[in-house]
Image: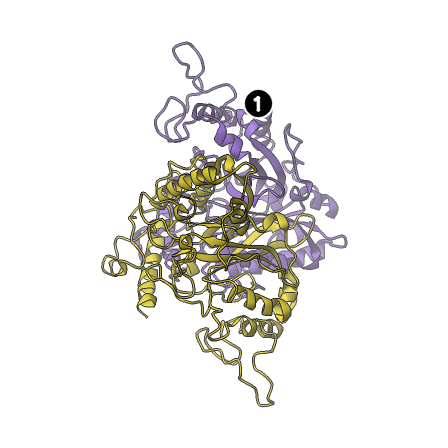
Chain colours: A purple, B yellow
Amino acid sequence: MAGKNSRRSFLVGSAAAAAAAAAGLSVGRELAPDTAPEAATTAPSVQPTTVEFHGAHQPGIADPTPTHASFLSFDLAAETGRTQLTQTMQRWTAVASALASGDTSVDPSSVSSGSGPGMFTMTVGVGGGMLDRLGIARPEPLIDLPAFPGDRLDHDASYGDIFVQLCSNDAIYLSGAVRAVRRTAGDALVPRWQLNGFRGVAASTSSTNGRNLMGQVDGTNNIAVSRGSSGGAVWIDDPSPEWMQGGSYVVLRRIRMLLSEWESADGVTRDRTIGRHTSSGAPLGARDESDPVDLAAVDTSGTLTTPDDAHIRLAAPRRGAGEEMLRRSYSYSNGQIAGGTDEDAGLIFVSYQRDPRTSFVPVQRRLAESDALNRFTEATTSAIFAVLPGVVDDDDWYGRRLLG
Amino acid sequence: MAGKNSRRSFLVGSAAAAAAAAAGLSVGRELAPDTAPEAATTAPSVQPTTVEFHGAHQPGIADPTPTHASFLSFDLAAETGRTQLTQTMQRWTAVASALASGDTSVDPSSVSSGSGPGMFTMTVGVGGGMLDRLGIARPEPLIDLPAFPGDRLDHDASYGDIFVQLCSNDAIYLSGAVRAVRRTAGDALVPRWQLNGFRGVAASTSSTNGRNLMGQVDGTNNIAVSRGSSGGAVWIDDPSPEWMQGGSYVVLRRIRMLLSEWESADGVTRDRTIGRHTSSGAPLGARDESDPVDLAAVDTSGTLTTPDDAHIRLAAPRRGAGEEMLRRSYSYSNGQIAGGTDEDAGLIFVSYQRDPRTSFVPVQRRLAESDALNRFTEATTSAIFAVLPGVVDDDDWYGRRLLG
C-alpha cells in the first residue's frame, strides 16, 4: 500500500508539473518519484518537470505516462561487435542523462532547444537475436514470441536487436530526443522501425484512465508498480543472469483498429465485445469503472452477464498464474491509409513484466483464439526485448554488466 | 496595435488555460479572443479552454495554435450534388459547434468522452474542382497551384474538393473530432487524405515562436491577425463573390525534411542556409530573434551578410506587393520510412491569405528556384482551398451563402 500511496502523491505533483510546463514555466529539478513524494505535497509551487535518470530500475516503466512516446528499434550493423555496441550504449547513457535533466545540447537538430523536458524518460532494451549474435546466452524469459492466429505482422516494423522507448509531455522535446538517439547510434546500428504514440492530457496528468481510439477506458485494473520496489510482477529479482537483475521484459504490439467498422456496430454489440459499458467503463451490469468485475455473474435466465468471448473475460489474469503485467499503451494515428479511405490508427500496446512466458503469452493466446474484439483489430507489429536494469550512477552505463 | 495587444493579452490567458487543462481542471466557458480580452486579465482564476465557434470569420485562423492539428481532405462522391453536400455541411456545423463547447456526444467512437476541448477549433474550406463540378464560378484567387520546380508530390495526399482543419491541445479529443467529421461526411464525400501535426507546448501556450524539426525558430515576423478585424492580409473584404466575404484562402504544403543530411551539415552551413543563427533565431550578424533583418548588410569585404540564396532573403515578403500571409504551420512525424532507415518527418506548412496569387505563389516561386534549403527538403503534399466565412449564429451553417 505504501508504494501505491506514494505513487498517488506523485501523480498529484505530476499534474501540477505538467500544468507548470504547459504555462511555459521552467521550474524543474529532479524529484525522484518514490524517494521524496512528500515534496510534491508540501511545496506545490515547485513542481517536477523531470524524472530522475539514475536508479536500480530504468525510468519510463513505473513512472506516470507522458502524453507522447516514440518507440525505436535498431538492428546491429553487419560489422558491429561488443566494442561498437558498448560505445553506442555509453553515448546513449550520456544522451539520456542530459535530456532527463533538460540539457538539450545533445540534440543534433536543436529542435528541442527552448523546450522543457516534460517528464522525459528514455528506456533501453536488447533483443534475443542480438544476444545470439554476440554469443551471449539468452535469459530464459527472452523467447521469440510465437505466431498468434490472426496476426498480420509488418516484418519491417516488428522485432529488432535494440529497443528504445522515449516519453515526454512535449512532442517537440521528444522529436529532439529521437534525433539524438538516432544520431548517437552511429554506424553501429541500423534503424529498423519507429512508432509514435500519444495519450490524452487528462490521462497523463491525473489518475484518470484514458480512452483508447475505440472509446474504451484503457488501463482499468492496471497493476501498481513503484520504481522504489523490487521483485513483483515487473522487476526481475533473480540473479540469473546477473546483468538482468533490476530489469524487466517489454512486449510491444501495434494493433490497428478498424474504426469505421467499430463505429458501425451498435452500442450493445460494442459493450458485449469489450465486457464493459463504453459510456462509463463499468463492467456489464455494474455502474462505475472501479466496480469489481464478476465474470461468473448470470442474468435471470442463467446467461453469463459477461459473454464468453468478451475481451475483459479473456484478458483477465488467471489468479495465481503469474499472468500480471504492467500495461503502458499509447494510441497512434498515421493519418489516412495510402490508397484507402480510413485512418491507419489504433493502439501501441506496451506491457512490462517479469516473465512474458507466464503473462503476455498465455493471455495473448486466449485473446487470439476467441476475443470478440478480433474482428475489429489486427496486430501489425510484434516485438519483445529484455529491458536492462537502471543506470545507477555517473560511472555506470546501459548494459555495463552485460557488455563491460 | 490594438489588435496586437489584445492578442497578446489573450495569449497570456491561453497559457494559463492550457495549464489548467493540463492539470485536469474543467474551467471552461467561451471567452472570445478579441471581443473580451480583458476578462483574461481581470479573472485569472477562470481561464478559457474553448474558442467561440460563431463569428464573421471561422475560428482556427487568427486564434492561437494548439499543440495538435489534423488536416483532412475529401472528394465529392460520384453522385454527390448540391443537396447531399448541403446536408454534410449542416451536419458538420452541428459537429463543430458541439465540439467547440466540449460536447462530445457527436463523437461516434466515444474516444473524446471525458477529455476537455483544449481550445478546439474546426475550419472548413472548398476546392476549385468542387466548384467546377457544381457549376459554380471560382473566385479569381482560387487558382490551381502551379507546379513548382523540385516538388515531389504524392498525388493521393494532395489537392481535394473539401478541406477540414481540426486543432486541439488534447490529441485524444482531436482523435474524436476526426472520427466525428469522417462519420458525418456520410456517403456524400470520399476521404482523400489526412495529415496529423504537432507543435511544442511552449509555442502553443505563449508568444514564444516554436522550432521546426530542423531546429529553426519558426514564425518569426509572422503577421498579427485578429478575428475581430476585417480586410487586411488574411480576411476577404470583397463581395465578389458574396459567399466568400469574411473568408480566406489556405495553402497547405507538406515538406519532408532530410533530417540526417541536415544534421550532417556544419553549423555555419546551416546558419547561412537559413539566414539566421540556429541557436538564437537571430538574423546573421544580429543577436536576438526579434532584431530587424537587414538584407542589404555587407561585411568589410563587401560580401552580403545574408547570402543570396538564404531562405529568409527569398521568403521575405516584397514590400507593397501584397505578399504577406499568416503562417500557421505544424511539424509532423510518421515514424520511420517504410523500407528506409530515417524518419518521415518535416513541416506541414499552412498559410492563410487574402489572395494566394500575390502572396504564396510568388514567394514559393522564388523559394523553389533558388532557396539554399531546397537540398534538405522536398514537398510531398500541395493543396489550396477557399476557406468559407464564419458561421454567424445557430441558423447559419457552413457555406449557406454558397449552397443555400
- Seen at 66% across and 42% down, the residue is A159
Q: A274 or A341: which is nearer to us?
A: A341
Q: Position of residue B344 (x, y in %)?
A: 61, 53
Instruction: Residue B96: name its quadrant.
Output: top left
What residue would you read off at disc 1? A370
> Outermost residue, right direction?
A79
Residue B39 to residue B110: above or below:
below
Q: B327 or A272: which is nearer to us?
A: B327
Residue A307 to residue A226: above or below:
above
Residue B304 to residue A353: above or below:
below
Total marks in image: 1
Amino acid at the residue labelled 1: Ser
Q: Quadrant of the N terminus of chain A?
A: top left
Instruction: Residue A278: name its quadrant.
Output: top left
Q: B16 or A293: which is nearer to us?
A: B16
Q: Is residue B85 visible?
A: yes
Left or right placement of residue A377 versus residue B12 in this view: right
Left or right placement of residue A388 versus residue A217 in this view: right
- Seen at 70% across and 42% down, the residue is A137
Q: Is residue A210 visible?
A: no
- Seen at 60% across and 24% down, the residue is A369
